[in-house]
Amino acid sequence: MNPQRIVVVGAGHVGLYAALRLSKKLNRRRAEIVVIDPQPHMTYQPFLPEAAAGNISPRHSVVPLRRELKKCRVVSGEVTKVEHARKTVTIQPIEGPATELSYDHIIVAPGSVSRTLPIPGLSERGIGLKTIGEATYLRNHILDQLDVAAVTPDPELRKAALTFVFVGGGFAGIEALAEMEDVVRDALKYYPELDKSELKFVLVEATNRILPEVGPKMGAYAARELAKRGISLRLDTFLNSCVDGEIVLSDGDTFRAETLVWTAGVKPSPMLDHTDLPRGPKGHVNCLPTLQVADSDGNVLEGAWSAGDSAQVPDLTNPGGWCSPSAQHAVRQARVLADNIRQVVLGGEPKEYKHKYIGSVAGLGLGKGVAHVYGIKVKGWPAWFMHRTYHVSHIPSFHRKARVVADWTLAMLFKRETIALGQLHAPREEFTEVTPPVQRPAERPKVDA
């Protein structure tokens, strides 16, 4: 009997955990597991704010696919089309022509991308926080602005360099804002030319509260703590424009800022536009509680599965609602999805995914946090410790857990590193400046004999 081919599109929380569990539950005589992703690693996104802050090495917040998925075939490329009617995927590898790959089962889990709006200047000025590259760039950019402010004779440029705007009051925005405020405050010790009173951190949030996931009381506590640190919270406010660094807010305020971080939500990967899978009203893949892809009438598409940020999965603990796009759901959905595929491959029936949301934890910088877990509200250092404990327990592999804990331990024993490595973003610039291009000699015209 030929093994069934299971193709996993995307190696985020769902893709990695599902592939890892399938490789343990099904031997190679039963199934061939193929994981396709443009990146050779999985990014543990809850650690991105700490990676940007320098509390964790960027390499330690990513998980190498080939090291973890030893029993799977890893393909470094981008899926450009899924034709489930033919059960084929089209793959564009890093180099070379596109190829088609057939499958018996497919897990569609490309994840999400930043949800942006048509705001003038946003594409030129905004910095996202969805990848390790963006986290590294954000750290280098912010520290570079301190150097700019310390030496420029232009008072307007100095003021703009010391103004940092974060848009979005969810987990990513608040944690990034709090961590980077910590970084800048620590770095000022080495800049006698700058004063703390010159710093301006601004949070822009369209709703009337922050961190809704931890509840109104803990969200209000977080807002008060951030305000005590001098951070300006602009609630019920929109970013109208940011052309050439000129920030225009809906409350009428206008000022210049050289740093604009956009963390205002996510949307399903645009890769889903190139599939023939049924979609929900917001573009997610339509799923049953069993994580099987189904049409609007509930008819199952045999062999198609989805979960995570790109899927619309009914929340059985909240009738009429959908599972939120969180790592908490993604990790658990991946486990159920893998077990369901195993059951189907072996001739069994899939089970429904059901998980009651246990709560959330959020970091507010070093030694500070909020948590609302199992109905219990925690704040300050205990919440920060819960935040770290929870996430280090969920990052895959013992190697990564040990390295992250080592990073945290060293950070407690020694002073924070405040070095900007801006040259990482243009590593060949200096070399090309000293190596002028050489024109090739013109080819001699051919002369017929």
Image (cartoon, grey):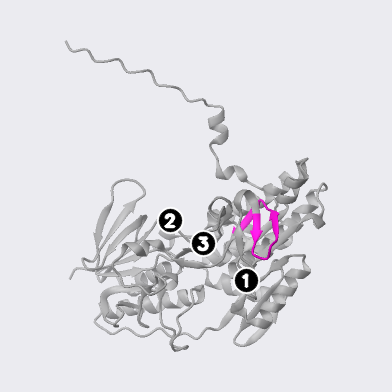
Amino acid at pointer 2: Pro
User: Disc 3 vs disc 1: Cβ atoms closer than 8 Å?
Assistant: no
Q: Given this view, does label 3 or label 1 mark the residue nearer the observer? A: 3
Horizontal and vertical percent for residue 262?
58, 60
Of callouts 3 and 1, which one flags the residue occurring earlier in the amino acid sequence?
3
The number of numbered badges drawn on the structure is 3
Q: Is residue 426 visible?
A: yes
Amino acid at pointer 3: Thr
Q: Residue at x 75, y 69 (%)?
A: 227
Report whether 82 appears left or right of 418. Answer: left
Majority secondary structure of magenta residues: strand
Q: Residue at x 55, y 40 (%)?
A: 427
Q: Is residue 409 visible?
A: no
Report whether 1 appears left or right of 428. Answer: left
Of the 4 image quadrants, the one containing the N terminus is: bottom left
User: Disc 2 vs disc 3: Cβ atoms closer than 8 Å?
Assistant: no
> In this picture, which residue range is highlighted in magenta?
247-261
Q: Quadrant of residue 263?
A: bottom right
| Pick the front one: 308 or 57 | 308
Q: Secondary structure at mark 1?
A: helix
Q: Residue at x 37, y 77 (%)?
A: 337
Is 182 inside the magenta-drawn segment? no
- Residue tagged 1: 388
Q: Quadrant of residue 176?
A: bottom right
Q: Secondary structure at mark 2?
A: loop
- Residue tagged 2: 40
- Residue tagged 3: 116
Amino acid at pointer 1: Arg
